[in-house]
Amino acid sequence: MIAFLRRGLFAVLALSLVLGANVRPIEAQSQENSRYAAIVIDAATGEVLFARNADSRRYPASLTKMMTLYLTFEALSQGKANVNDVLTVSPRAASQPPSKLGLAAGQTITLDDAMRAT
């Protein structure tokens, strides 16, 4: 039984060496894509370790929605807001692109409907 296990182990190791010898490294994709932005900063020293389009303006999209919902749920749990509260769309809010609700300045929506619309 031990001899069988040794032969099996030897076969696996030999196969690994043969197959591993044919592996070629691949080149990394170019990091010059201007659609993406990134920055990595060492929290202890403040040193910028990596930056690509770090100063370009980006729209936070879903992150903004999540933070807005988080603060809304916090206000609801503290009793500072109610799901039946009526929100009036400001001219500034109505002018922000993109808007999937299509609300104009002065229109109203309940907090509950606004939360579900995100």
Image (tube, helix red, strand yellow):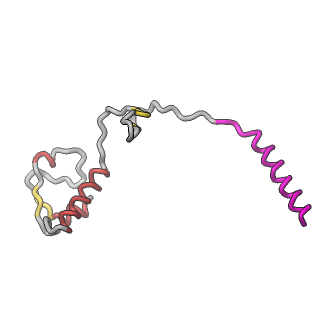
Is 47 positioned to the left or the right of 99 in the image? right
Residue 44 spot, x, y in % from top left = 39, 40
Between residues 108 and 74, which one lies in front from this camera angle? 74
Position of residue 52 relative to residue 74, above or below, is: above
Position of residue 98 relative to residue 66, above or below, is: above
Position of residue 11 relative to residue 18, above or below, is: below
Instruction: Single out the residue that lies furthest toward the left.
Output: 106
Residue drawn at (77%, 39%) of the image: 21
Residue 27 spot, x, y in % from top left = 60, 33
Between residues 88 and 70, which one lies in front from this camera angle? 70
The answer to whether residue 38 of the structure is visible from this angle is no
Q: Which residues fall within the magenta stretch?
A: 1-25
Q: Please identify the dominant SS of the magenta region.
A: helix
- Is 16 magenta? The answer is yes
Residue drawn at (19%, 45%) of the image: 96
Between residues 91 and 48, which one lies in front from this camera angle? 48
Instruction: Single out the residue that lies furthest toward the front.
Output: 44
Is 7 positioned to the left or the right of 109 in the image? right
Image quadrant holding the C terminus, namely bottom left
* Res. 70 image quadrant: bottom left
The answer to whether residue 114 of the structure is visible from this angle is yes
* Res. 60 image quadrant: top left
Residue drawn at (29%, 42%) of the image: 59
- Is 8 magenta? The answer is yes
Residue 54 spot, x, y in % from top left = 35, 33
Between residues 32 and 43, which one lies in front from this camera angle? 43
Residue 94 spot, x, y in % from top left = 15, 48
Image quadrant holding the N terminus, namely bottom right
Instruction: Report the number of discs.
Output: 0
